Amino acid sequence: MKLNQQTKLVVAVAIFAIAFGIFAIQFLFRGNDAADFANAVVCIDADTGAVVKDFVPPAGKMMPWEGKGYKSLYAAERCYYTKDGKVKSEPTYVLVKRLMGKDEETVCPDCGRKVVLRNPSPSIELIEQARKEGR
Ligand SMILES: [Zn+2]
């Protein structure tokens, strides 16, 4: 009877340990995903002009970054304007020349406005309104 209870206890501890292990692994992986998601940036490849979304820059490395099959990735700026000066919900991603060390102004290929580093965005309300209106 006593042995049987000890066996039950061992089984219970083993089940708890396995459950805890699975939980811990899931928690750790989810933590990594969340961190990657937070660190991900939209990049533009200077060689091809390709827009690369969800790129996680290598820690401690300066631009240009390499990855996802590209060799000259720079963080993209967002331009939320249309040619007629309205706000749109999906930005145009622009590679600002100053980021590549070029002392030239950069204009948005879509609307022709000047784009600068840390390009100011319209308010969330205007972007949300543009989304509702299908722009
Ligand atoms: Zn634009």
Image (cartoon, rainbow, N blue to C red):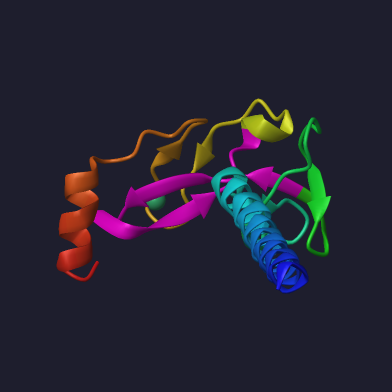
Residue 85 seen in this snapshot: no
Image coordinates for residue 67, horizontal then vertical, percent: 81, 56
Q: In the rendered view, would you say 111 is above or below 107?
A: below
Image coordinates for residue 99, horizontal then vertical, percent: 66, 32
At x 61%, y 46%, the residue is 35
Q: In the rendered view, would you say 21 is above or below 112?
A: below
Q: Is residue 90 magenta?
A: yes
In this rendered view, identify the residue nearer to me: 12 or 1.
1
Main secondary-structure element of the magenta-colored stretch: strand
- Indicate the quadrant containing the C terminus: top left, top right, bottom left or bottom right: bottom left
Residue with the most extreme front position: 1
At x 79%, y 30%, the residue is 60
Picture mark count: 0
At x 68%, y 68%, the residue is 5
In this rendered view, identify the residue nearer to me: 12 or 120.
12
Residue with the most extreme top position: 103
Q: Is residue 41 left or right of residue 48?
A: left
- Indicate the quadrant containing the N terminus: top left, top right, bottom left or bottom right: bottom right
Q: Which residues are magenta?
A: 73-97
Residue 93 seen in this snapshot: yes
In this rendered view, identify the residue nearer to me: 9 or 123.
9
Q: In the rendered view, would you say 37 is above or below 39?
A: below
Specify the quadrant of the image occupied by residue 124: top left
Image coordinates for residue 85, horizontal then vertical, percent: 23, 49
Image coordinates for residue 32, horizontal then vertical, percent: 66, 51
Q: Is residue 79 magenta?
A: yes
At x 78%, y 56%, the residue is 47
